[in-house]
Image (cartoon, coloured by chain):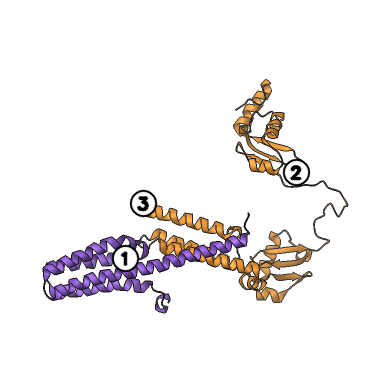
Chain colours: A orange, B purple
């Protein structure tokens, strides 16, 4: 039993490291060759995990070999358009200029029901509203609506908008994210000052805090501490709850 | 200096290929060497048994067992454990047949043991018949 336990752990660590090296796409939207490798790796890890008669190396070497093959294929796809087309295929235009492309549907073995389903998922219940629908190489359908049917945006109304960047997390579960704080161009002193302004005594009181693009700090205290703080606030002792 | 990711990937691929090829070649050579040693020791025991020198056969088989005990651990990490069990069982049978001074049984078990030991490095060789 202990042998199976250790073998499972070793193989799990190797598979996790392999998937991490293979890149983020491996856990999200897969290309055909990536899907094949993911399926094979799971099988290669499962067999020696259960069967203690098979040496562990017989599972590890094929996993590493697939890692090398995948890295090579990704590298070749990165460098050459032809290889990319060969390994990943090309996107297929299923709806072109508002017209369904029957030939492409047939070529991709994609039924009209599949197409309509995908359009509904993308919030286009009426096929008339679609200018282009493209079946991407990872199997997803991208939809470009007709210009009259696309959502209205501030530019259409000539409305000026302020810059909106990304919000940066600075406290997660009471811990200060120093790197993120640095990215936001702030330091701990600033953070403590801001927390005091919002009547919190230390970062430990907070579940989450983030800085928005205008530099404003949003804070969400721990649930138990919120209660404490509310009580303290009522008693006129803000920021000392815990 | 920060290295380019492509260069890093190429370095990683080279390291992995070297590791895989290194392990494969090393294990093949190790299996071949150990198997030759075992077969040579077994051959001596067979010669003694064929001449019905049972004491000589027994002590030679003791040498085979010693060598086998030494290599068994490494082999377990490289080959199917069923193969290891086969060798263990055949060796035990051969030992008891030699103790019982049974000539035909000893010779046939020795031949079986030799085949078990000999076919392992053959199975690991990069040959068409092993690929398909």
Residues flagged by tags 3 and 1 on a common chain: no
Question: Residue under circle 3?
Answer: A2
Closest to the observer, B45 or B76: B45
Marks 3 & 2, CB-CB < 8 Å contact? no
Determine crowd level at label 2: few under 14, some 14-19, many 20+ residues with C-alpha closer than 10 A: some
- Secondary-structure class at tag 2: loop
Quadrant containing the C terminus of chain B is bottom left
Judge whether residue A67 can be spotted in this image: no
Residues flagged by tags 2 and 1 on a common chain: no
Q: Residue at point 43% right, 75% down?
A: B131
- Secondary-structure class at tag 1: helix
**Going by the image, does A67 lie left or right of B30?**
right
Judge whether residue A27 can be spotted in this image: yes
Say which of marks 3 and 2 sits in front: 2
Q: Quadrant of residue A53?
A: bottom left
Q: Residue at point 68% right, 33% down?
A: A189
Chain of the residue under the numbered disc 1 shown in the image: B
Marks 3 & 1, CB-CB < 8 Å contact? no
Quadrant containing the N terminus of chain B is bottom right
Question: Residue under circle 1?
Answer: B82
Q: Residue at point 58% right, 62% down?
A: B9
Q: Quadrant of residue A211?
A: top right
Q: Between marks 2 and 1, how big is the CA–CA gap?
A: 64 Å
Position of residue B106 measured from the top left corner of the image (x, y, whole percent): 17, 72
Q: Which of the labelled discs sits on residue A141, or is there none?
A: none
Question: Residue under circle 2?
Answer: A213
**Going by the image, does B95 lie left or right of B16?**
left
Chain of the residue under the numbered disc 2 shown in the image: A
Marks 2 & 1, CB-CB < 8 Å contact? no
The residue lying furthest to the front in this view is: B1
Chain of the residue under the numbered disc 3 shown in the image: A
Closest to the observer, A114 or B126: B126
């Amino acid at each position: 039993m202990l042998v199976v336990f250790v073998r499972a752990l070793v193989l799990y660590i190797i598979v996790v490291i392999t998937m991490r090296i293979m890149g983020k796409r491996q856990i999200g939207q897969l290309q055909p060759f990536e899907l094949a490798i993911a399926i094979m790796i799971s099988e290669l890890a499962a067999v020696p995990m259960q069967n203690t008669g098979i040496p562990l190396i017989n599972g590890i070497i094929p996993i590493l070999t697939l890692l090398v093959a995948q890295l090579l294929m990704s590298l070749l796809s990165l460098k050459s358009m032809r290889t990319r087309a060969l390994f990943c295929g090309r996107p297929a235009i299923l709806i072109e200029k508002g017209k369904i492309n029957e030939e492409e549907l047939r070529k991709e073995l994609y039924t009209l029901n599949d197409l309509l389903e995908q359009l509904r998922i993308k919030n286009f219940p009426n096929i008339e509203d679609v200018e282009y629908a493209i079946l991407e190489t990872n199997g997803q359908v991208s939809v470009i609506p007709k210009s009259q049917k696309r959502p209205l945006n501030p530019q259409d109304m000539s409305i000026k908008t302020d810059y909106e960047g990304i919000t940066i997390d600075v406290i997660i579960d009471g811990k200060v994210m120093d790197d993120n704080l640095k990215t936001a161009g702030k330091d701990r002193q600033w953070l403590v000052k801001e927390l005091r302004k919002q009547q919190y005594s230390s970062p430990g009181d907070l579940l989450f805090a983030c800085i928005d693009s205008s530099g404003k700090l949003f804070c969400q205290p721990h649930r138990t501490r919120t209660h404490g703080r509310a009580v303290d606030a009522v008693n006129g002792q803000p920021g000392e709850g815990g | 200096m920060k290295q380019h990711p492509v260069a890093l990937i190429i370095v990683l691929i080279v390291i992995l290929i070297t590791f895989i090829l290194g392990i494969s070649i090393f294990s093949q050579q190790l299996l071949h060497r150990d198997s030759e040693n075992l077969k040579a020791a077994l051959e001596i025991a067979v010669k003694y048994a064929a001449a019905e020198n049972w004491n000589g056969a027994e002590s030679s088989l003791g040498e085979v067992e010693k060598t086998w005990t030494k290599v068994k651990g490494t082999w377990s990490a490289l080959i199917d454990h069923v193969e290891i069990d086969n060798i263990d069982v055949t060796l035990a049978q051969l030992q008891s047949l030699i103790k019982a001074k049974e000539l035909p049984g000893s010779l046939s078990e020795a031949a079986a043991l030799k085949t078990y030991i000999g076919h392992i490095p053959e199975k690991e060789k990069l040959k068409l018949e092993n690929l398909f």
